[in-house]
Image (cartoon, rainbow, N blue to C red):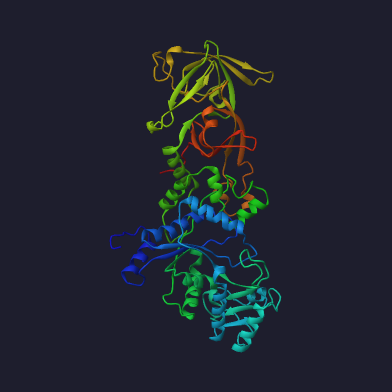
Amino acid sequence: MENIEASNFIEQIVIDDLAAGKVTEIQTRFPPEPNGYLHIGHVKSMLVNFGTAKKFDGKCNLFFDDTNPSKEKTEFVDAIRKDISWMGFEWAKEVYASDFFPVIYEYAEKLILDGKAFVCDLSPEEISATRGTLKEGGKESPYRNRSVEENLTLFREMKAGKYPDGSKCLRAKIDMASPNMNMRDPVIYRILRSTHHRTGDTWCIYPMYDYAHPICDYLQGVTHSLCTLEFEDHRPLYDWVGINLGFAPKPRQIEFARLAITNTVMSKRYLKKLVEENHVHGWDDPRMPTVTGLRNRGVPPQALIDFCTKIGVVKANSECQLSYLEACIRDDLNANAERAMAVVEPLKVTITNYVGTEKLTTALHPLKPELGERELDFSGTVYIDKADFSLDPPPKYQRLKLGGYVRLKNAYIIRCDEVVRDEKGEVTELKCTYVPESRSSADTSGIKVKGTIQWVDAFTGVPAEIRKYAYLLKDAEYAGQDFGERMNLDSETIYHGYAEPYLAASEDESRFQLMRVGYYKKCVDEKGGLVLSEIVSLKDNFNK
């Protein structure tokens, strides 16, 4: 281990702990609560927990914090497993807080017997009102000095179901004058009648996370409990539980900054609201920052890992530009995605001097000749994108205009001779002529054109539903507003265009660079029709 260099402050702490002999083997855990789907913020936590353990030849458990049965489902457990596996991480053991419910309960009785916990009859609202403020200490509960015997009896009666929900709770007896409000006699057990996704109705009392967290870490053998920064103020309570229950060695909690990205909802509570209020099609909507949504969009898992690696692990919270994530996705796809052509808004082009059909060939990937070539059908009628023609072109316009030339990618140079319009004056067809000597890779025409555009053969092109996405939330200057006020109601636009047959014949879920359009994932709809779903645009807005 002496040759390992730290790439962040957490790894330096681990190196120091190993060198000092405080630990001999590293054990971490990735601890999601199964109350929703994982989002991109969890990818950073995966990388920190699984990555740290792997770097030091340690182990990382998948630990489900299932202490709140009213919000947790087996559906979420299954989704979390799938997401982690898709990201390429492997866990040593799958562990649940509910595995330890009997032991967690026994530890609570130990705290009572040691005079360090008491049963409180105050309501949650009354407890909140007596906690004090950041400047003033709290007020002790009138039930704080109950005898050990009374507390033990009441706690066992809570467990037996004698009292209604919310009527009593178990609190740690610490210090109501503590400057850290988390240490002001925190609740460690509450009465909650809710069927648990694993234990059913066995329990009607459940431990609070801050109490169960250090116990579960200790029972798993966790050496370094890696949490996001909001748990920093909870660390004294984490340590208090470990010390007062005699944990040796006691796990060490280390906090790091969580991931925040512009234009992106990074809260499971708000993501759930988006789903329930039908702002999106579901947890796997391609616009969602959930791992399942990113997978459905076609984002490569390695791009997410590269992104989280590049932003690093630091102590201070900050916000990352979404364009940085897009740049990482784009870099991966540019290197690995095959090329193809599609037109989003088709405009018919009739080549009046072309007769017959022919097969053209082009590379599947310009930087990877080993991938081979694909064939393109070419005839006297093709579709181009409406955006690639202008009746009133601006100066230095390089696409097609009346009397102007443009090259059809991997094919010929054409000139627009005539424009056909409908009764509304809309352009419906272009009459063009082609230059026979201008075939790509064998051009002897001597004609120089600056513009090259994509096209699809009108006779063999496949109808395609093309889905384009914008940011789900409006940009960063809306950050102080509720997400409902920041929603972009036009974040999904569907077009009906055409694609070359190669796209339709490719495997489902394949990723492509649609030339001059963007990076897209190929899939099929319920009727077997071709769907091209945008992954990321071609344009890179990130300032490197």
Residue 28 lies in quadrant: bottom left
Nearer to me, 510 or 537: 510
Nearer to me, 376 or 146: 376
Q: Is residue 405 visible?
A: no
Nearer to me, 381 or 470: 381
Q: Position of residue 296 (x, y in %)?
A: 55, 44
Residue 398 lies, with reference to residue 435, above or below; the image says below
Q: Position of residue 159 (x, y in %)?
A: 64, 77
Classify the position of the N terminus by image quarter: bottom left
Q: Position of residue 234 (x, y in %)?
A: 51, 70
Q: Position of residue 297 (x, y in %)?
A: 54, 43
Residue 194 lies in quadrant: bottom right
Residue plotted at (53% across, 47% down) = 294
Classify the position of the C terminus by image quarter: top left
Indicate left or right for 469 with 436 as reference. right
Residue 167 lies, with reference to residue 227, above or below; the image says below
Q: Please identify the residue farthest to the left as the structure is shown.
A: 3
Q: Is residue 487 visible?
A: yes
Residue 166 lies in quadrant: bottom right
The count of marks equals: 0
Indicate left or right for 119 with 297 as reference. right
